[in-house]
Image (cartoon, coloured by chain):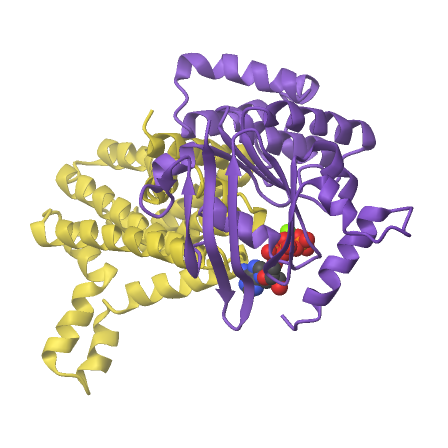
Chain colours: A purple, B yellow
Amino acid sequence: MGELINARNLVKSFGETQAVRGVSLRVNAGEVVGFLGPNGAGKTTTMRMLTGFLDPTAGDIALNGLLLHEDPIRARQSFGYLPEGAPAYPDMTVREYLTFIARARGIPARRIAERLDAVVARIHLRGVVDQVIDTLSKGFKRRVGIAQAILHDPPILIMDEPTDGLDPNQKHEVRELIRAMGSTKAIVLSTHILEEVEAVCTRAIVIAAGRVVFDGTPADFERKAPDHVTRNRMDYAFRAMTAAASEVPL
Amino acid sequence: MSPWGTIFRREFTGYFATPLAAVFLVVFLFLAGIFTFSMGGLFERGQADLRSFFQFVPWLFLFLAPALSMRLWAEERRLGTIEILTTLPIPLSHAVVGKFLAAWLFSLVALALTLPLWLTVAWLGDPDQGAIVAGYIASAMVSGIFLGIGGCVSAATKNQVIAFVVTVVLCFLALLTGFPLVLDFFRGWLPQGAVDAIAGVSVMTHFTSLMRGVVEFRDVVYFASAIYGLLLATNLMIDWRKGA
Ligand SMILES: Nc1ncnc2c1ncn2[C@@H]1O[C@H](COP(=O)(O)OP(=O)(O)OP(=O)(O)O)[C@@H](O)[C@H]1O
Ligand SMILES: [Mg+2]
């Protein structure tokens, strides 16, 4: 399997602010890319462009070989997306919501129940499947968001802070899930937890002030810290990489 | 099911997931009853028709349609679900149409619940059935236009209260420009052509025209193209404002 995401020179301006200033990204099947960067670095904005929610000010995006702006509907079929904060309709039950997403994604009616069962089992939603989303705990809401993203078993997964707000057990489970799916899919996830990158990612990309300041394996990432640092080496490397860029006024 | 059908179904059942539906229907019927019987003087006039009801319908919808439309898009934006909805593999136009039709059908349900009024006058006398049918069509059209305006406004904001207020104001203007008093005011300083144009785009002009009992091609074209135009505007509004 080949290249599933190819984004070239993405730029996004909001009026005066340049949130993203020329980010390029190529991701192959079998890669799990961890997107790192300080608050406001442009991670969410980049992911919103990758999914077509935001139109880039400049640059173009190909997903599964389809240009997003030329063939948006078919390109959108190839990914699942967990937006920041895992939004969902609060007045629906988990089952109603996932059924709605399945229908909207064009999954044939006779296969919806089977897909739902598979995902509900995989994300451990069995106990809450008939509960109204509004009454779920934060962690369960996030899991509903993940379930929604993988319902159609897409080749590409884009997840904005998938483990934010999960307890350590759930964090572990979601990481296992991502790792398992990562062998066949192209996955891009953002996170503020550096250990997560070591635990699940095959590649780390650090962006600061809208630019890529590092792109390499988690091991390379750690080597960016000087030898005398023995504890929290990734934190140290992260600070070193992002400090310079963050001094540029946004 | 086609994509718009999926959106329509979720939206329509969504009205019933909260007490909103019940509150709306009760208020609608209550006001319809008051207007028709007390203020409209259905009995005093001694005529078996529904004119007294229909003449108040635009004013009823002036407040009730914005209450239905305010959440259509503002709620999606506030929740962030717009990010999921607009990245699903369905054309945006399907989402726009599906949501609009759900709100419209709901307002038609409210209208349908006034059918006992029709039965009452039919029982009391011998009403002009054609005029009543035309009255219902005219009412459905007015609610369609108001919901179209409301959907477009709702697409521009995260705040349902703002969406409600702005929609009421715009709908009020759309009604007002059809009244002789207002048109006379314009006549003082605008050429006749411009005054005709203002009257021509007014909801009220076409509503009263339909109400006369003749379904004229002109009025049908007006309502159809106004709703189409408003849906188009909603589509553009979402595209333009979704990230903001
Ligand atoms: N709709 C918008 N209008 C104006 N500015 C925006 C908008 N969305 C994002 N920005 C700005 O773009 C920059 C990048 O924001 P973004 O949300 O992409 O950061 P992030 O890396 O996801 O941060 P975090 O780690 O806090 O989630 C920020 O300065 C933000 O204020
Ligand atoms: Mg973010």
Quadrant location of the N terminus of chain B in the rendered image: top left
Q: Position of residue A233 (x, y in %)?
A: 84, 47
Give the residue furthest to the bottom.
Answer: B189
Instruction: Tell me the quarter of the picture where residue B179 sits.
Output: bottom left
* A81 relative position to A56: left or right: right
Q: Quadrant of ligand 1?
A: bottom right
In x, y percent, where is residue B235?
34, 52
Q: Where in the figure is residue B165, as x and y percent of width and height?
A: 47, 62
Q: Residue at x 26, y 69 (%)?
A: B177
A189 in relation to A11, above or below: above
Q: On the rendered structure, is A199 left or right of B132?
A: right
- Using the rendered view, name the quadrant where residue B182 is placed: bottom left
Residue shown at 17%/82% (left/top)? B187
Which residue is rendered at x = 64% and y = 15% of the image? Answer: A121
Count of numbered circles on the image = 0
Q: In the image, A118: left or right of B57?
A: right
Viewer can see residue A89: no
Residue A156 visible to the viewer: yes
Residue A55: x, y in percent? 43, 55
Q: Nearer the viewer, residue A42 or B93?
A: A42
Nearest the viewer among B70 and A98 is: A98
Question: Residue extending furthest front?
Answer: A227
Q: Is residue A102 left or right of residue B117?
A: right
